[in-house]
Image: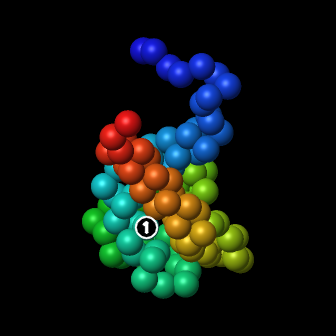
């Protein structure tokens, strides 16, 4: 694979974009994001009740989304709360839009 010279390549934003897109690479994670977008915060059990997956599977998907910075984790006594990192999702949207616009532009 031929890449542009290192001084013309902005890798940090691309690394973040790639990590977030990888986190969205499973349909269950997209479903979880849609669920979280409809409310302020919820616990894992509430997500399990809405999608047909085991609690341990949902927990693993949430862990990936938290690591990618798309979901916020807040421990709360016996129930941990998860919420959408709306700013990160907005930046992801802009990054994907910029990528697609760049790829579609004629030079």
The answer, for residue 103, to whether it is visible in the render is: yes
- Establish if 2 lies above or below 67: above
- Establish if 93 lies above or below 36: above
Question: Disc 1 marks which residue?
Answer: 33
Which residue occupies 60% across, 69% down?
87
- Establish if 38 lies above or below 25: below
> Depth check: 59 or 102 in front?
102
Left or right: where 69 falls relative to 89: right
> Depth check: 85 or 16 in front?
16
Mark 1 lies on a secondary structure that is: helix
- Establish if 14 lies above or below 28: above
Left or right: where 52 falls relative to 98: left
Which residue occupies 70% across, 76% down?
76
Q: Quadrant of the N terminus?
A: top left
Residue 44 spot, x, y in % from top left? 50, 70
Quadrant hosting residue 71:
bottom right
Residue 36 spot, x, y in % from top left? 46, 75
Residue 12 spot, x, y in % from top left? 65, 39
Which residue occupies 32% across, 45% down?
104
Residue farthest along the top direction in this orientation: 1
Quadrant hosting residue 34:
bottom left
């Amino acid at each position: 694979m031929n890449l542009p010279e290192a001084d013309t390549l902005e890798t940090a934003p691309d690394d973040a974009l790639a990590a977030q897109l990888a986190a969205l690479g499973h349909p269950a994670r997209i479903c979880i994001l849609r669920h979280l977008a409809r409310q302020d915060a919820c616990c894992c059990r509430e997500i399990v009740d809405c999608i047909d997956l085991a609690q341990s599977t949902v927990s693993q998907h949430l862990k990936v989304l938290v690591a990618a910075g798309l979901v916020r984790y807040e421990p709360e006594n016996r129930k941990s709360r998860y919420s959408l990192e709306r700013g990160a999702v907005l930046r992801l949207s802009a990054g994907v839009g910029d990528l697609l616009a760049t790829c579609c532009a004629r030079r």
